[in-house]
Image (cartoon, rainbow, N blue to C red):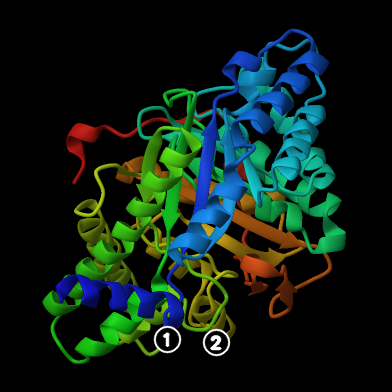
Amino acid sequence: MRDISNIMDTLRMIDQQHLDIRTITMGISLLDCVSEDPRRCCDKIYDKICRRAANLVRTGENIESEFGIPIVNKRISVTPMALVAGSCDTKNYVPFALAMDRAAKDCGVNFIGGYSALVQKGMARGDEYLLQSIPEALASTQIVCSSVNVGSTRAGINMDAVARMGRIIKETAHLTRDTDGLGCAKLVVFCNAVEDNPFMAGAFHGVGEADSVINVGVSGPGVVYHALQQCKGQSFDVVAETVKKTAFQITRMGQMVASEASRRLDTPFGIVDLSLAPTPAVGDSVARILEEMGLEVCGTHGTTAALALLNDAVKKGGVMASGHVGGLSGAFIPVSEDEGMIAAALDGTLTIDKLEAMTCVCSVGLDMIAVPGDTSAETISAIIADEAAIGMVNSKTTAVRIIPVEGKTVGDMVEMGGLLGSAPVMPVHGASSADFIARGGRIPAPLQSLKN
């Protein structure tokens, strides 16, 4: 009877509470595609992606049909392209992005990640060329995603790279201004980036990974929200325990799908990412979970504490359900992709400053935030530096995905469609950070032995 009850619970979660597998992501190493000839390298990149991921979408659809579990996205991540293209005799890296885009489209996936560089301690030749190509690459492709890691707990923060990324984001916004800066929604700036993240836009296949792996990202904010409705007025001990039990159920489903996809694709199983990833759909919001804990509006005082509880309980419940947990694992707070966050931002309660505080205790960071088009590159760089500092000092992954929308100002709405949703343009501080960013160099790594 208990097994039947568990099955019925899962069916109810899927039918009524927006439970789904957010993504099956195949990670593919491109290190064996290196060639001095850029055309030959692009051909090898295209061939290997198509060869490895040829059956990824079909397999995901078959599992979805047979088990009745929605699998929203099928995606690919590859070795950071700066490493692969760095040996080529060329300064123009856009063709590598075009090869990725073409291969991903032919495989039928939603996105491909890995147009990336790791520059937390400095920039090699390939990193330099990749960074300068990002705006054109994202404007010239449709489903390629890019990420740049500018800091880490061990290396500190590369402030020269931080300054560059502010200018790159502005240029990307300009080149994709006809779609309200959509290129910036495919660009993430990290501190402490992880090698096995299945979520876009920050996914890449780390050099410590196998030749190819299957990583799965689960979701289920709606499930957690409905579970908490059953413990109104009860103590936080009960709230935490309820979230843990719910996260266990969600992760078991992800573990099953990951194992099945791994078997059918004859590809090693990597990790299950436990992250609660919201959508713009009503009832599938992380913000509404926090409000269910007793907050009138997400962003008011108490929000950071509520999010800390949620993030910790999700991890505690999830690690009991899978032998291999990784990626980002926690709760995402992307403004445009969460209807509760959108409402709180429109209300004025949720601000960028409050979001920054919330990122101290949750997965990733300032995500899918629209700002006025006249926001300076230096201000964007300073926002990145603040977020990277939180990640560096707290030994956690933090990131910024920010969209300066040309021609729009505070209060205007930006429509991006699909899972990217819509976002109100949020205010930034008017006081300048230009002299701070102009200093360059590196912010040293923290002394971990004195961490408190």
CB atoms of marks 2 and 1 within 8 Å: yes
Between residue 162 and residue 51, name the one nearer to us.
Answer: 51
Image position, residue 394 (x, y; %): 31, 46
Give the CA distance from mark 2 to mark 1. 9 Å
Q: Residue at x 41, y 39 (%)?
A: 263
**Which quadrant of the structure image shows residue 286?**
bottom left
Q: Secondary structure at mark 2?
A: helix
133 lies above or below 42? below
**Which quadrant of the structure image shows residue 254?**
bottom left
198 lies above or below 429? above
Q: Earlier in the sequence, mark 2 or mark 1?
A: 1
Which residue lies under the disc numbered 1?
297
Question: Amino acid type of disc 2?
Answer: Asp
Which residue lies under the disc numbered 2?
347
Q: Quadrant of the N terminus?
A: bottom left
Between residue 25 and residue 256, name the one nearer to us.
Answer: 256
